[in-house]
Amino acid sequence: MREEASRWSERNRNARVRTDNRTLQQVVKNLRGLSHGEARVLARKVICDDGAITQEDLPELNKTKFQLLDLEGVLSFEYDTARFVEVGGLSNLKRWLAERQGIFLGAEGVDLPKGVLLVGVQGGGKSLAAKAVAGLWGLPLLRLDFACLYNKFFGETERNLREALSLAEQMAPCVLWIDEIEKGLASGEHDGGVSQRVLGTLLTWMAERKAPVFMVATANAIDRLPPELVRKRRFDELFFVDLPDQAVRAEIFRIHLARRELEPTGFDLHLLALASAGFSGAEIEQVVVSALYAAQAQQQAVDQTLLLHAIHNTAPLSVVMAENLNALRAWAQGRTVMA
């Protein structure tokens, strides 16, 4: 990195490459696993565009590294990682991650944060939170889809899981996201013991890994998860993501209105939050989208009336699946930390 910075400076009248120490160290760490020539090419690419090394360079750097390592197939690279300012609520999770960010990014050893398991309501923001961890820490986000392993590598699932985990270590430091983990690990009577062997492979890796790979797993059906996975020390913490309260619903409306270039101050967010009691974050987003469709069809601007109409025409999951939600909340009480 220093050599390429010096070369750029010589070609540009001794101008200095702009950066800060934290970003520079992240770039250096993210070049791990590449050959000397590949690392030099990426260093040059980061600097040459604008003579600066910034946080905005990290996603493109990580994507290029992922392509160079030829990891397509077993893992997918999530290019668009959310920022925590785009995630409403989850204050306890945000604070927990902020406390561990410096340790994970700056230290080595066995006491590095291992990961979190996010359990909760469908559409409550678990997957968005997983993306936001990578965005907050400036790390590549890799997604492991158990369904692809089972379907595409039938008969060799365990071997391919070990390969995927090994490839994640090559991308370290990184965040490994396993969405709806219960679908890949729920034991079945007719799978020839594959689920149990996959579970054993994953648990061994979780216990023995030394590489800085932070694992974020999400689950909707906690009762389908094997007890060995949920117990302490497999994950650093087990968080429960509940439906947003009134204040958070107002914040989610503000986020989604602003994202679609609708000025939030032009709406009564308090009233919208009151009317959408029991709505998940995903359902609130769909309310905004439905109001946009209605406005376009009626050739008018989105207003409060259209949003309220969309709310009243939506049956939230908290009503449709009320019994399941109550059972999930009862299980989480005393067993999890509220996100």
Image (cartoon, helix red, strand yellow):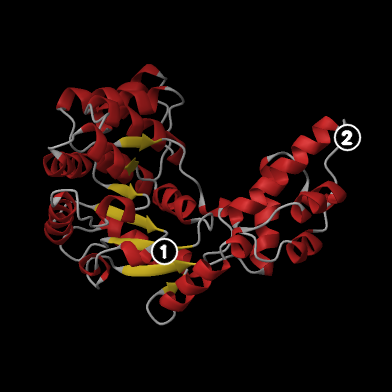
Q: Residue at x 15, y 28 (%)?
A: 35
Nearest the camera: 49 or 175?
175
Q: Which residue is mark 1?
A: 119
Residue extending farthest bottom = 334
Q: How many marks?
A: 2
Q: Quadrant of residue 320?
A: bottom right
Q: Position of residue 79 (x, y in %)?
A: 42, 35
* Residue at horizontal 22 percent and vertical 52 percent from the top: 212
Q: Position of residue 56 (x, y in %)?
A: 46, 37
Q: Is residue 6 above or below residue 325?
A: above
Q: Position of residue 13 (x, y in %)?
A: 42, 20
Secondary element at image label 2:
loop
Quarter the N terminus occupies: top left
Sequence-first disc among 1 and 2:
1
Task: In this rendered view, identify the residue nearer to me: 63 or 184.
Answer: 184
- Density class for disc 2 (Cα within 10 Å; few <14, some 14-19, many ≥20) is few
* Amino acid type for the residue under numbered disc 1: Val
88 over 256 or under it: above or below: below
Q: Position of residue 178 (x, y in %)?
A: 33, 49
Instruction: Name which residue type carries label 2.
Output: Gln
